[in-house]
Image (tube, rainbow, N blue to C red):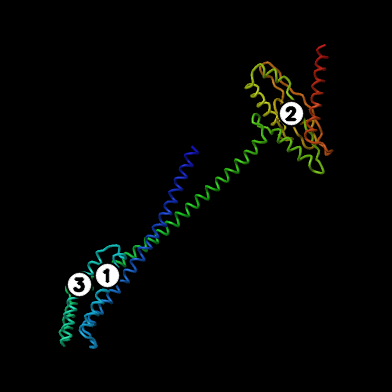
Amino acid sequence: MRVVRLRREHLVLGAIWLLGLASLASIFVLQGRLDQRRRAQIAVVGLRMQVSTLPKIALDLNGNLTRHQVQAKLGVAERGILETAASLDRLSGNRRDSRVIESQARELFPLLAQADGLASAGQLRAATVMLGLALLPGAPGYRLNETFAAIGDRYGREAGSARRLSELGSIVAIVALLAAFSIALARASHLARDKQLLLEQSRRDAHTDDLTGLANRRQLFADLDELLRGPDVAPAQLAVLDLDGFKAYNDRFGHPAGDELLARMGSALGAAVADSGEAYRLGGDEFCVIVRGDGAEVVFERARAALVDRAGGLRISCSLGSARIVADGSTGDELIRTADERLYENKRASRVDQRVVAV
């Protein structure tokens, strides 16, 4: 279930990242389109200005050019118009606009040539009237100006649309990337928290007995080192407890039953000393208790009572040996060894007493 949830989170995060990156890519595309349409608008304005100079060139109002010079100047101006119109192919994204402008401009060029001929023959008025007629509705000049206006307006609308879409894409990209960063940050925080929890659990496991849930030998020696490290050691005692009769029970009923008994007795031991000390399992059927402060003997008796049980017709009890924790240079190993020696002395004494009673 966790794997499925992680995969779902990864898919969602990947989708958001892709959305953000796609939005960024679309912004670059739309910005390029916006730039092209604006440049196309400028090109249309330039075409208007180029066309507006044609009548002045054709009429040669200053009268200082020969007809051949006027024709040459008209030719240069006309080629400039066609070249500017051709540049719209790249800026507008289609070839239709330039073709329409070129077609309509070519219809106007012969009229300019005729006007030039009339002006050169001294018929300036007739030439002026001819050019004026070219600007009437339906005439080449009128249609060309209408085309400029229509194309310029369309470029303006396309530029506005590209700008709005670019702004929308920017918002989507920012929101998507912020969402992706937030999810990634939350995921990283969650992973860090999980890692910390796992680390803490690992540390607890390293200092906890798996079978009984009590602290283990490693934790016992860590606690003893802490008690012995300070210059002023508070009163404390430890007791080592070893089960009597457990081996016979384990041999008769098997290890699983023995483990279940150890787990039950370990739980009882922990509950018995919980308010006054700490309980540990040293391994096998050996336990340990540390009591800080006074009243250790009372706590030790409660611990001994907790490790008495009747199971399968057998009586399980325990022997106990204790040692005082003092800052005399002793180590944890030495304290455990002292308590062990006293434990086995108590075992031997108990066996002697049992023999005496039997006699």
Q: Which residue is mark 1?
A: 85
| First in sequence: mark 2 vs mark 3 | 3
Q: Quadrant of residue 271?
A: top right
Depth check, front residue: 204 or 29: 29
Q: Is residue 285 above or below residue 237?
A: above
- How far is disc 1 from disc 3 in space, using C-alphas? 12 Å
Q: Which residue is mark 3?
A: 106
- How far is disc 2 from disc 1 in space, using C-alphas? 103 Å
| Amino acid bearing label 3 | Arg
- How far is disc 2 from disc 3 in space, using C-alphas? 114 Å
Kindly give the residue lying farthest to the right in the view shown: 328
Query: Pointers 2 and 1 in contact (CB under 8 A)?
Result: no
Residue visible at 81% across and 20% down?
348
| First in sequence: mark 2 vs mark 1 | 1
Residue visible at 80% across and 18% down?
351
Callout 1: SS:
helix
Point out the image quarter for the C terminus: top right
Q: Residues within 10 Å of mark 2 (few under 14, many from 20)?
A: many
| Residue 222 tag number | none
Residue visible at 49% across and 42% down?
6
| Amino acid bearing label 2 | Ala
The percent position of residue 18, horizontal first and vertical second, equals 42, 51
Q: Residues within 10 Å of mark 3 (few under 14, many from 20)?
A: some
The percent position of residue 303, horizontal first and vertical second, equals 74, 28
Q: Quadrant of residue 270?
A: top right
Q: Is residue 295 above or below residue 166?
A: above
| First in sequence: mark 1 vs mark 3 | 1
Callout 2: SS:
helix
Q: Which residue is mark 2?
A: 303
| Amino acid bearing label 1 | Ala
